[in-house]
Image (spheres, helix red, strand yellow):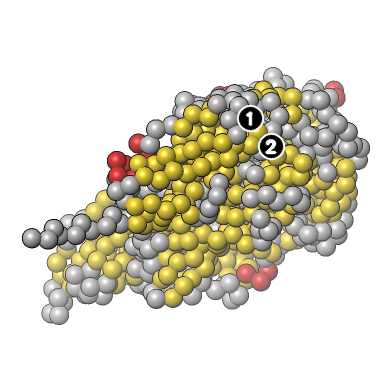
Amino acid sequence: MAHLFLSRRTLAGLLLLGALGQALGQLPTSRLTAIFPMGCQAGGETEVTTFGGDLEGATGLYFSRAGISAEPIKAGENKFLVKVDAGVPAGVYEIRYIGAFGVSNPRPFVVGSAAELNSPGANTGVGSAFAVSAQSTVNGVAIARQSVWYRLPGKKDQRLLFRLSTEALDSRLDPVMYLRDAEGTRLKRAGAEGLIDHTPAKDGDLFVQIHDAAFSGGQEHFFRLEITTGPHVDFVYPPVLNDLKGSSLTLYGRNLPGSVLSNKIGLDGARLEELVVGVGDLTRSELPGGVVLPPASIVLDGGVYRLAKGKSVSNPFFVAHASGQTLTLEKEDTDNQAEPQTAKSPGVLAGRFFPARDVDAYKFPLKKDGVYWLDVYSQRLGHNTNPYVTAQIVNVAADGKESAEKANEFYESKDNPGGREFNMTNRDVTWRFQAKSDGYLKVELRDLFNQATDDSFKSYLVSVRQETPGFKLVVHPQTVPVAKDKRNIELMATHLRKGSSLPIRFVAIRRGNFNAPIVVNANNLPEGIKLRNNEFKQGQTSITAHLMNEGVEQPFTGEIQFVGQAEIGGAKVDIPAVTTVTRHRVGDYNNEPVLARLAKGSVLSVAQGDPEPVRVTPVGQAVFKGVSNGKVKIPLGIERHGEFTANFKLKAYGVSQLNNLGELEVKKDQKEATLEVDLAKLKVPAGRHEFHLESTVKGKYHYPPLNGKKSDKKRDVTYRLFTMPIVLDVAPAPTAKPEKK
């Protein structure tokens, strides 16, 4: 149901570059690029093969949902017997690989309601088409420069839906899907969502043909094809719930139980059915849940919903949550520019960019001296739209006389606290303003992309609310290039070796002019693991904290939770962080898009018997003290493992004044070193400062025992070293005593 905010077809060639192998020369860490099959029927079992990098020493799989389990089939092979309890609801969950090099990044794993079939891979022509049936799901992989084919018996007047899932499962496939008859005649072509709706006029075999738009292929170009007589939801209106118990929604789609025909048309030109449902008639799951939303949608609360029809369930669809807020609906299909429709304020208004070239106008009441935020959501709901908004404050005097202020025009938001790895730029609108007197805000909006076609599914939300401070917290495992000139983005997992430090990036999405400090805490950490450098300063939107393994010996794999704590309105509040992950490895972010999504939590692994190759630690004391007009000497211990004997240079990070501190060279035979900090020369202010040292280290990494057997395997490695934090307590320089006369 969701629509891409960036055309996949325009990116197809670029994405091929990102499909190349993982960057070599880094410390091995489990990376999961694909699994096959991508799902299993509830109450069933299947053999799952994992693909990726550094997937040695398999011990199991980690699932985000209880009731799904796995056992290795054979030592040394990345194949697992996965079992799904019958009580697990249909939906999209996450799977992670666990092996000698820790827990991997997540990949989606689907629990379905229909029988599962696995494509054999040899079905590259009509004559070798793989036999399938209605009410089944096919797991398949696209083959480069070829199509894959499927055959099923078509029955007269039996309406069939062919639903293809790709991007929502982190696939690189940009799909093209055709439906043909036994003579090869093309009957239907998939729409933008990978959906074909067909009712045969007679009995006879039907053929499904699938390939990549650029005829790429391989294990990362996978898909799930559902062939169903069950329900499908094209879109929902309104796209928001303000009461999670008593609200109702109107679903527009196909095969909806108890529905009536509507006047709405789908992307394929089919007339859609209409069904009003209460929220209690739907099943709900948490994001991402199989929908595709841009990173900027993180600011929205919402859930993923499905509709059941017997044993069949619909595709997932996203609905925003505006709990407790007043909801106003657009008076549909009317031109209200001459007399704008009055909406509630504060509150949320729902409308649609329909018909083509539609312009809608609204009035939101304002109170004198009130500080307000205007938000328009459409692209962030998953629609391929570009809202153009005109907002004008109109002051109303006691005698009713109106005076309009200068109109403001908006058409995009360039605010991007998420940076390159979680790019939050979007085409929606956000504006902070203050009302000088009682009056109203006049808002006109149109979709710059909606000039020619009547796309009835493209909805929007307009929110006008008084300023309320708050924030959301995003956590993203940090990609660390081994050199400044590298532009790669890797699939990162949260894995710690003994004595190691792992950078974790946190992003604070501040709302309502909230600029206070935020402290990030980590829950469920094993003893000996600490989160350091974990405080946002005043107004700061991004920090890189470090998870430190200060000597944990016992292995660990489990879910951890990051929580941001701040003071808002005189009270301390705790905001759980939302985890995000990179969808695909990127070789050069200047030439390839970096695609990210939400994940179902953070999972940490701690290695046993696999120490950090080089460890640098401060010696002797927890806090080093000095005076602002003096110097401080910090002794360092150097510990090496394996064949890491090369010289390296340490550079200080974390305190801006130390940026001008020169590099400290460590020779290959050194077991200790001393860092000297000239506080006066560097103008380090009085107070407590925490920093760390970084370096690029080269050597040969020795593999630990794999599958219970000693390994002689080695790898040439260049990796980034992060030291344990160094705490510096700087006292003010003593005041000079006046000379005696």
Residue 71 or residue 29, whichever sits in front:
29
Seen in the picture, residue 239 relative to 166 is either above or below; the reply is below
State the image quarter where residue 522 is shown.
bottom right
Q: Position of residue 523 (x, y in %)?
A: 62, 62
Q: Is residue 314 above or below residue 692?
A: below
Above or below 124: residue 162: below
Q: Position of residue 73 (x, y in %)?
A: 91, 40
- Residue at image position (75%, 57%) is 65
> Does residue 453 appear left or right of residue 396 in this picture?
right
Question: Can the viewer see residue 662?
Answer: yes
The amino acid at mark 2 is Thr
Q: Which residue is mark 2?
A: 29
Residue 142 got which mark? none
Q: CA distance from mark 1 to mark 2?
A: 8 Å
Identified at 64% across, 50% down, the residue is 550
Tell me whether the residue at label 1 lies in contact with that at label 2, contact meaning CB atoms closer than 8 angstroms: yes
Quadrant in the picture for residue 185: top right
* Residue at 58% from the left image edge and 40% from the top image edge: 637
| Residue in the picture at 69% in, 57% down | 526
Q: Position of residue 640 (x, y in %)?
A: 65, 33
Do we see residue 319 in this rendering?
no
Which residue, given by chain and number where applicable, does mark 1 sit on?
26
Horizontally, is 725 left or right of 408 in the view? right
625 or 457, which lies in front? 625
Count of labels shown?
2
In the image, farthest residue toward the right:
74
Which residue is the extreme one toward the top?
145
Tell me if 667 is positioned left or right of 508 in this view: right
Where is 645 relative to 384, above or below?
A: above
Question: Which residue is farthest bottom?
Answer: 398
